[in-house]
Amino acid sequence: MGADFTTDQKRYLEGFVSGAKAVQIARGAPAPSTAPVAEMTGPDAASHRAMARQEAQGRKLTPEEKAKRDELGLDSYDRIRSHARDGVFPKGQDMLRWKYHGLFYVAPAQDSYMCRLRIPNGILSHWQMRGVADIAQAHGGGYSDITTRANLQIREIPATSALDVLEGLVALGLTAKGSGADNIRNVTGTPTAGIDPVELLDTRPHARAWHHYILNARDMYGLPRKFNVAFDGAGTIGALEDTNDIGFQAVEVKDGFGVAPGVWYRLALGGITGHRDFARDTGVIVRPDDATAVSAAIVRVFIDTGDRSDRKKARLKYVLDAMGFDGFLAKVEEKLGAPLTRVPAAAVAPRAEPDRLAHLGIHPQKQAGLNYIGVGLPVGRMSVSQMQGLADIAVRLGDGDIRLTVWQNLLISGVPDASVAAATAAIEALGLSIAASPLQAGLVACTGAKGCRFAAADTKGTARAIQAYCESRLALDGPVNIHVTGCHNSCAQHYIGDIGLIGARVPVNDDGDTVDGYHILVGGGFGSAAAIARELYQHVKAEDAPLVVERLLKSWLDHRAAGETFAAFTRRLDPDALKALAEAA
């Protein structure tokens, strides 16, 4: 047995293995290997040892952990093929296993699959966009959604088309592998990477390197829960890296602090805003080319130490809470076989503030005579014809790239000055806009009850209604972020919105009948203004949400101090005062 087990744990494991062997023999099943768990080898060994270690401590594994030990989702492809041939959807823990291939069975919201892609740094080519549109047309609902991880999802996929979608994506140089379940999700980065006039660092090579490492290291699929990594190059548009488990923040390190001056990544850990926490500065800086090695070491420590008995506590934040940052980083250094580089806060130059409107409209690139155009998409949804039209604009009038953002919109880059007017007209002909309106710029919504079985309300419908209602009644002179999420998974990150709405079933009578509705929060923020929003209203009917939001915004316009943002306004006043002002608005 390995040195990391006590004598009592060794005896427990020996008895556990012997008992399992006896039961399986009695049932006529193949007996498990009698090799000690601590001596396992291979890419799955670390996660299986972590499971056994927690069982040896008397903790009960979650059903999901047992399912992963029985069959890791990566090994289920043949059965996915069989299900597609027979036209049937997965049941039980196979629903989890299928997600390892990017397939989500979303019943009862829709009796179909959703497929989530992996697009590192959110950048794809015009021909990939057109190819995804073709797949969505032939095998999906004729549209796609941009996610809050700068990614694409195809919905309404029948059981018989599962392999057509997965293999069609691979033919495009794309993949859905590991985009769901307990895996490292899509790798995000600065959407203007490589073209941004103010960026410190081009994040594209580092996001791609980490993306390909994940795809080719099987042990990266042995996590206890999902994991998010983001690279922010300090460009004009923020990457919301402080909401990730690992946030790499490009910073300029000054001379005179014992390390080479220049641009490094500052390492932040533990962001999970659905659990009301942002990634915190560790005091560690990382050479950009070392980011993949450091990420892998962090993930491997998480595999060893993450909770596998409680899904709600199985995220990196809780490991950090239990071990402390110093204890956790010491284990990371053990995995790396080298010390991490630490500098005091004074060694790092201040970072420029991102522009909250820069993901919409026309903006000059660092390349002279070229521009990127931010295209607004109502709550991130594009029809197939719009996808095809955008692909055509990108190749005909731009550099051929399409850049997705965490704000559920996209950029068309490399547009020459002489082509800006034509590109703008072509975008508008698709029924889309480039206008950087304060509400459009900050409106974010998850899939909602029409496409997700966890959601308690139609979030996209509500978000559209809020925008239409408020824009027709208010003249906002600054950005306001409104995040509409359907459940406590917080895919739309309601806790960081100036206004956040989280779906709830609202009682309407004494018979237990309910309708779509929300709890409403205010005062969230991100980056240098990071804050967790606080709840202001409970059980607001969805039909009443636009009016409530309009009153909150009007009370801010009427009573704010000079230059005071909505978030600062709502943080300054107590809840009762805010409600009184809103009700009088």
Image: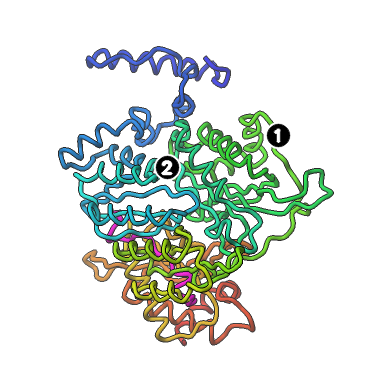
Residue 309 lies within the magenta run: no
Residue furthest to the left in view is: 86
Q: Nearer the viewer, mark 1 or mark 2?
A: 1
SS at mark 2? helix
As drawn, 381 above or below 62: below
Q: Residues within 10 Å of mark 2 (few under 14, many from 20)?
A: some
> Where is residue 381 shown, x and y percent of the image?
35, 64
Q: Residue at x 48, y 49 (%)?
A: 120
Disc 2 marks a residue whose amino acid type is: Arg
Marks 1 and 2 sit apart, C-alpha to C-alpha, by: 32 Å
Q: Who is closer to the viewer here, 374 or 76? A: 374
Q: Quickly name the residue at label 1.
A: 339
Q: What label does residue 311 carry, if any?
A: 2
In this image, 53 relative to 110: left or right? right
Region of the chain picked out in magenta, as a range? 436-454
SS at mark 1? loop
